[in-house]
Image (cartoon, helix red, strand yellow):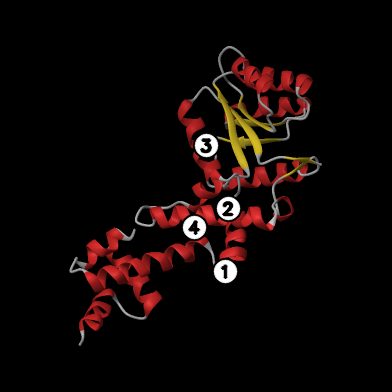
């Protein structure tokens, strides 16, 4: 079994905005997949395939210079371990069927729906996991895992007043957000989101007690620009809304 951090994906389509849309969809899947390259035609794609260790190729059919059918034929001959997927519209569906003889694993209809992409990737994962192994608990020592959690905590403490994307933190460490949450629960005793919420509420309590900033300003200062959401979260955590908490602190 070959151990890798993630599955490398190559996107091939001459429509720039379609590639960007696909990339945004992939970002929602955490760090299981990594967009290792983009190309606007088959020739560019082959150049990337010669340099990068690609696991999944997703390609359009109609492209200039070298179209998708010619590309998958070359991939079938030169890079047989790469799993290929065809992007197609209804008008090109017959071409997609022709590609089956080049061992194309699947196809996606344009415009690509996130659910269709996710389901296709789950099917490919089953095949990829026969050869590759992604990070799991067995790959990290207890000391190493705690170091990652400590790094995440340090980042949260420094940036709690900003919008924090936990999946970005996980990605910077080479993990999926689900795996980071698993480590966090094990070594911090709670999820990253709960840790962040508790930290923000503690900071808000300090500000409410020691300053006369408006409630909305306090919320913004601890990462909640929406005053209604801030008050709701504060009340859920403390049993009081921010105004009641402040008044209670002012009592002799």
Mark 3 or mark 1, which has the lower sequence index? 3
Quarter of the image with the N terminus is top right
Q: Which residue is mark 2?
A: 148
Mark 4 or mark 2, which has the lower sequence index? 2
Question: Could you tell me how far apart the alpha carbons at marks 3 and 4 are, in whole angstroms?
Answer: 28 Å
Q: Is residue 14 above or below residue 203?
A: above
Tag 3–tag 1 contact (CB < 8 Å): no
Q: What residue do we see at 58% from left, 18% from top?
A: 41
Question: Could you tell me how far apart the alpha carbons at marks 2 and 1 are, in whole angstroms?
Answer: 14 Å
Q: Which residue is mark 3?
A: 23
**Label 3 SS:** helix
**Label 4 SS:** helix
Name the quadrant containing residue 208.
bottom left
Percent coordinates x, y for residue 180 in the rendering = 59, 55
Numbered label attached to residue 39: none
Q: Which residue is mark 4?
A: 153
Percent coordinates x, y for residue 126 in the rendering = 75, 46
Instruction: Name the front one of labels 3 and 1.
Output: 1
Question: Could you tell me how far apart the alpha carbons at marks 2 and 3 are, in whole angstroms?
Answer: 26 Å
Neighbours of disc 2 within 10 Å: few (<14), some (14-19), many (20+): some
**Label 1 SS:** loop
Q: Is residue 233 left or right of residue 99?
A: left
Name the quadrant containing residue 204.
bottom left
Along the viewing direction, whichever of 40 and 106 lies nearer the viewer: 40
Mark 2 or mark 3, which has the lower sequence index? 3
Quarter of the image with the C terminus is bottom left
Residue 113 visible here: no
Neighbours of disc 1 within 10 Å: few (<14), some (14-19), many (20+): few
Question: Could you tell me how far apart the alpha carbons at marks 3 and 1 are, in whole angstroms?
Answer: 33 Å
Q: Which residue is mark 1?
A: 189
Along the viewing direction, whichever of 50 and 102 lies nearer the viewer: 50
């Amino acid at each position: 079994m070959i151990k890798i951090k993630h599955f490398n994906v190559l996107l091939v389509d001459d429509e720039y905005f379609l590639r960007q849309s696909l990339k945004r969809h992939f970002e929602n899947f955490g760090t299981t997949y990594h967009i290792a390259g983009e190309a606007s035609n088959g020739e560019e794609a082959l150049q990337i395939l010669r340099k990068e260790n690609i696991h999944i190729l997703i390609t359009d059919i109609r492209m200039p210079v070298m179209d998708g059918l010619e590309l998958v034929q070359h991939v079938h001959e030169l890079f047989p371990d790469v799993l290929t997927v065809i992007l197609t519209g209804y008008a090109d569906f017959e071409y997609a069927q022709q590609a089956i003889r080049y061992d194309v694993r699947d196809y996606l209809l344009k415009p690509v729906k996130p659910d269709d992409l996710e389901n296709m990737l789950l099917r490919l994962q089953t095949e990829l996991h026969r050869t590759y192994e992604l990070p799991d608990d067995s790959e990290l020592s207890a000391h190493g895992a705690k170091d990652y959690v400590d790094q995440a905590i340090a980042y949260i403490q420094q940036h709690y007043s900003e919008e924090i994307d936990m999946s970005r933190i996980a990605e910077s460490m080479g993990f999926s957000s689900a795996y980071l949450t698993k480590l966090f629960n094990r070594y911090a005793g709670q999820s990253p989101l709960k840790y962040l919420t508790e930290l923000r509420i503690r900071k808000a309590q300090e500000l409410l007690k020691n300053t006369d900033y408006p409630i909305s300003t306090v919320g913004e200062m601890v990462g909640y620009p929406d005053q209604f959401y801030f008050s709701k979260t504060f009340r859920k955590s403390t049993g009081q809304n921010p105004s009641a908490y402040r008044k209670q602190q002012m009592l002799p």
